[in-house]
Image (tube, rainbow, N blue to C red):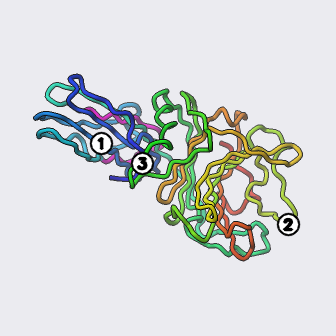
Amino acid sequence: MAAGCSPSSTTKDTDGVAELDAFPLLSVAAVGENVYVGLRLRWSGAREGKVDVQATANADVVADLTGEFSLNGSSGNTEDSVLFRCSREGTAEVIATLDFDGGLAADSVLIVCVAPKPDPPKDHFYSISSLPATFLAPYIDMLGFATKRVTLTAEQASQLSTLAEEPLPPDAPVVLQAANAEPLVEEEVAVVHTGFAAAIPRMDSGHSLTFGVVWESDGAAANDWKVQGNYDFDQYQGADLWYETRWDHMMSTWSVRATQVADDQSTSEVPTRARSFLYESRIVWVIPRTEIPSANPKYRVTSYGGDGTFSPADSGADVNGADPTQAMLTY
């Protein structure tokens, strides 16, 4: 079964003898990539029936490569998966329906298909342009990125809000949130997808890592981060709101944080309800749109790895585009 989030809420059939979970609740993939919808079933008594998994809303976004399958047997548990492929950019709701001897159970997942913009490979840099990058790991080498506007239902928001608190299966992404993060609600979110040239290590004993999406969030120039000293390739220049997924190799911890820049260039950590999904070689952000006040904000996606001191002897970075002096993109 492909990597995914924890299962969504269990749904029982009408006579209470069968249960169905469909997961991951949220999948984000590029057009042309396959997406697995996992199914976990439990039933009691001798049962026969079928499971049908179909895209309903925006069904043409995904192509069903599997269709329905049959189940029969006495009491037990089983897991299986069905395969879809992203056909075009968009969002599709996929509903799994379990029909067991007249009983009925259903569960749904959301698939977000994106069309990543390509990013040049092997274009690591150091934050002082006259010095070369010295940490050249492929898992900080950005190959593509995309953003998508998605409106969460109340149920989707509720389930996404609890993922970081639940035990996750071994093949699931790492789901991260800020300390004391408030729940997501029924709302529009910015989904930001970034893909890298190699699998991101869950633990890197020698290097700290930062994967970010930074915003010019309010249309005001006064609080936009300015280049400090000789650091002309500062990844965050021009941005006033920074979202970061961090691995601290000295503390052996992953974390999420949001940072606001003030007019005097001071910075402070601010509350955020954002969630970060760390897949094998991808980072997916789900950020409440209300946290980004501008109607037309600008953004940049970033990655960094190094010894934790930003030493030129062991540091490397990447951003969308050639380098961070290029104009930020309009969301």
Q: Are marks 2 and 1 in contact (CB under 8 Å)?
A: no
Q: Residue at x 52, y 65 (%)?
A: 197
Secondary structure beneath dot 1 equals strand
Compare marks 2 and 3 and give the one earlier in the sequence: 3
The residue pinned by badge 2 equals 230
Task: Give the residue type at disc 1.
Answer: Leu
Q: Residue at x 57, y 69 (%)?
A: 205
Q: CA distance from mark 2 to mark 1?
A: 54 Å
Circle 3 crowding by C-alpha within 10 Å: few under 14, some 14–19, many from 20: some
Pick whichever, 221 or 184, lies toward us: 184
**Does 133 sit above or below residue 20?**
below
Circle 1 crowding by C-alpha within 10 Å: few under 14, some 14–19, many from 20: many
Q: Which mark is residue 254?
A: none
Relative placement, left or right, of 183 versus 46 is right
Q: Main secondary structure of the magenta part?
A: strand
Pick whichever, 274 or 148, lies toward us: 274
The residue pinned by badge 3 equals 168
Q: CA distance from mark 2 to mark 3?
A: 44 Å
Secondary structure beneath dot 2 equals loop
**Does 292 sit above or below residue 203?**
above
Secondary structure beneath dot 3 equals loop
- Residue 251: horizontal and vertical position, in percent? 62, 61
Q: How many numbered discs?
A: 3
The residue pinned by badge 1 equals 39
- Residue 229: horizontal and vertical position, in percent? 87, 63
Pick whichever, 26 or 238, lies toward us: 26
**Magenta run includes residue 108:** no
